[in-house]
Image (cartoon, rainbow, N blue to C red):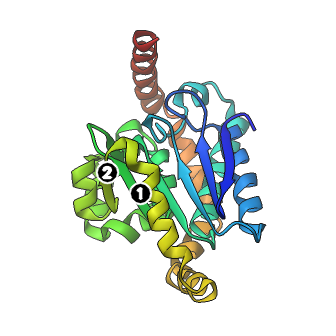
Amino acid sequence: MNTIQLSVRDKIAYLTLNRGRSNPINTELCNELLRAIRDIESDENIGGLILAGGEGFFSAGADLIELYDYNEEEVRNFWTTFLQLTARLAAFKKPLVAAINGHSPAGGCVMALCADYRVMAEGKYIIGLNEVPVGIIVPNSIFSLYSFWVGTANAHRFLLEGKLLTGEEARDCGLVDELVRPESIITSAERQMKKYLQLSWKTWQQSKTNIRQDLVAKLSADFSPMLDEMLKQWWAPQTRAALQVIIENLKGKSAKNG
């Protein structure tokens, strides 16, 4: 695996995003996560999954630098695969805890929202869905996922302004469950995972399935018409111009940090 690392200890799988400093999401990362999640869910020796990023970043979201140069088929394939990944994560039957090690905007936030519990590192980190200012249309399924945790009114406000929240703001509105020191994040995620694993597996799993039934149905529904609208906007001159500005800033930051 080129973009993720997987280890198992005491019936807990640890899946760590490992694609550069900021873990930007591309098609390869989505596909590797999909395969790993299927394997973990079918492995009877694994009770739950902790999904983590690296120091300073859980994931910066979609790799806009790479995606910008995709042709029409490639960009459609990326968004199709990412939406499939979102549905698969949300429907994951075993306990899933997200260890949000740092910044987690856009697609990084979407992946974290699929978890049953989110632990976020203290510090000047941000999390949220900022697609609208970038020019990316937010599917109703992602709105449903967001509002599942923060409520309809907050999801509406946050999405339409592309609000990125501090850790404290995220905790206060229910986007994350716990803020801890960065060095304690895996320990805290393990503590919550062990609480889940002490419960009756059948009762826990069926309850999660029942609770998420409507949400999973929305995330798994045919998204072709919506994707057509997303891609139409993706290629619009205004969006391409906005993406160019963002990419130039990202490249500038990368050069400065490098």
* Helix, strand or loop for disc 1: helix
Give left or right: position of 120 versus 108.
left
Q: CA distance from mark 1 to mark 2?
A: 8 Å
Residue receiving disc 1:
188
Q: Residue at x 66, y 64 (%)?
A: 11
Q: Amino acid at mark 2?
A: Val
| Above or below: residue 161 compared with residue 55 | below
**Front-lying residue, 57 or 10:** 10
| Tag 1 near tag 2, CB within 8 Å | yes
Residue receiving disc 2:
180
Residue 48: percent from the left, percent from the top? 61, 66
Q: Quadrant of the N terminus?
A: top right
The residue most toward the bottom is 203
**Front-lying residue, 66 or 239:** 66
Give left or right: position of 144 versus 68.
left
| Above or below: residue 97 compared with residue 230 | below
Q: Residue at x 48, y 56 (%)?
A: 98
Residue 154: percent from the left, percent from the top? 26, 63
* Helix, strand or loop for disc 2: strand
| 10 Å crowding of disc 2: few (<14), some (14-19), many (20+) | some
> Which label belongs to residue 211?
none
